[in-house]
């Protein structure tokens, strides 16, 4: 995929907020677009998730309980409709 098509795809799906490269010690820089979207600041603690062995996701540790509550409510709604 060309760089132009990649950037266009990122804008259209609003999920891709930039690209980054892993360094020799396994470190990556979170793109500024993603930091702004998540309102991240220096020192924030993040939990890292892997999905299907192919995708990484981040969430602030202090927001995890709210995330779990939201998922639980969604799952309970689905169960009620079965």
Image (cartoon, rainbow, N blue to C red):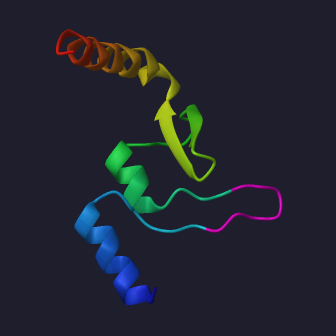
Query: In percent of the image, x 70 and y 63: which residue is there?
Result: 22
Q: Is residue 71 above or below residue 12?
A: above
**At which x and y percent is residue 70?**
30, 19
Relative to the observer, which residue lies in front, 39 or 56?
56
> Residue 35 appears at what percent x and percent y?
42, 51
Q: Which quadrant of the rendered structure holds the C terminus? A: top left
24 within the magenta span: yes
Magenta stretch: helix, strand or loop mostly:
loop
Q: Is residue 61 left or right of residue 35?
A: right
Image quadrant where residue 45 sits = top right
Q: Picture coordinates of residue 78 (x, y %)?
A: 24, 19
Instruction: Give the residue at x 52% y 24%.
Output: 61
* Residue 47 to residue 22: above or below: above
- Range of the magenta residues? 21-27
Closer to the camera, 41 or 75? 75
Location of residue 4 in the rendering, given as x and y in whole percent from the top left corner: 36, 88
| Residue sitting at x 48%, y 61% | 31
* Image: 15 above or below 18: above
- Rendering quarter of residue 6: bottom left
45 vs 64, left or right, is right
């Amino acid at each position: 995929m060309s760089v132009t098509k990649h950037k266009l795809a990122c804008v259209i799906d609003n999920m891709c907020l930039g690209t980054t490269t892993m360094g020799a010690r396994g470190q990556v820089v979170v793109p500024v677009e993603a930091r702004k979207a998540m309102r991240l600041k220096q020192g924030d603690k993040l939990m890292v998730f892997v999905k299907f062995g192919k995708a990484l996701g981040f969430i602030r540790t202090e927001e995890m309980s709210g995330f779990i509550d939201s998922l639980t409510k969604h799952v309970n709604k689905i169960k009620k409709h079965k």
